[in-house]
Amino acid sequence: MLAITTVGLLLTHNNMQNDYLKLALDNLGKTFNAYNSGRFVAQQLMRAQVPLPEGSHWDASPAHLIKQMHHLLGVLQATPGDLLFWGTQNAPYEVGIYVGGNHFIAVNNGDHVAKIQTLSRNWYPCIAGSIF
């Protein structure tokens, strides 16, 4: 019975992660006035109803989002739907949603448009976090 419950939980988490990633992808090209990437990420997590303990809510600050991760991992271990953080683990200043293939979704600070962007040497995150 435990194995069936564990499989059910994993399937539920995979479905939530896919729903959350799909919501973010559906927003590509849309303008989010007065939004930064942290607020965009938190909104996608809330809209997909990804749960947090004790009825708390997803925070828009990268410094708070990183503390809400289920676990942290190296950037090379990130899978689609994981969050990428720029800065340091103790003081991240930017966040994006990893989509795979060295690409992530974030709201551009200049035009406030949700875009798929490419990781590069000049713009590489310090750590990734899993929401599940």
Image (cartoon, grey):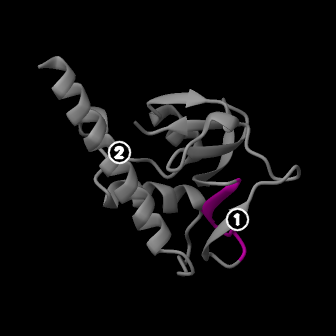
Q: Nearer the viewer, residue 12 or 37?
A: 12
Reply yes or no: does residue 108 show up in magenta. yes
| 1 or 2: mark nearer the eye | 2
Q: CA distance from mark 1 to mark 2?
A: 24 Å
Q: Judging from the image, what secondary structure is the residue with disc 1 in?
A: strand
Q: Which residue is mark 2?
A: 14
Name the image quarter holding the N terminus: top left
In this picture, is 77 found above or below 110? above
Residue farthest right in this picture: 122
| Span highlighted in magenta in the image | 102-110
Name the image quarter holding the C terminus: top left
Q: In the image, what residue occupies the spot 56% across and 46% down?
A: 83
Report whether residue 54 is seen. no
Reply yes or no: does residue 128 show up in magenta. no
Report whether residue 53 is seen. yes
Q: In the image, what residue occupies the spot 17% across and 27% down?
A: 5
Q: Where residue 111 sits: x, y (%)?
A: 68, 79
Q: Which residue is mark 1?
A: 117
Q: Nearer the viewer, residue 131 or 32?
A: 131
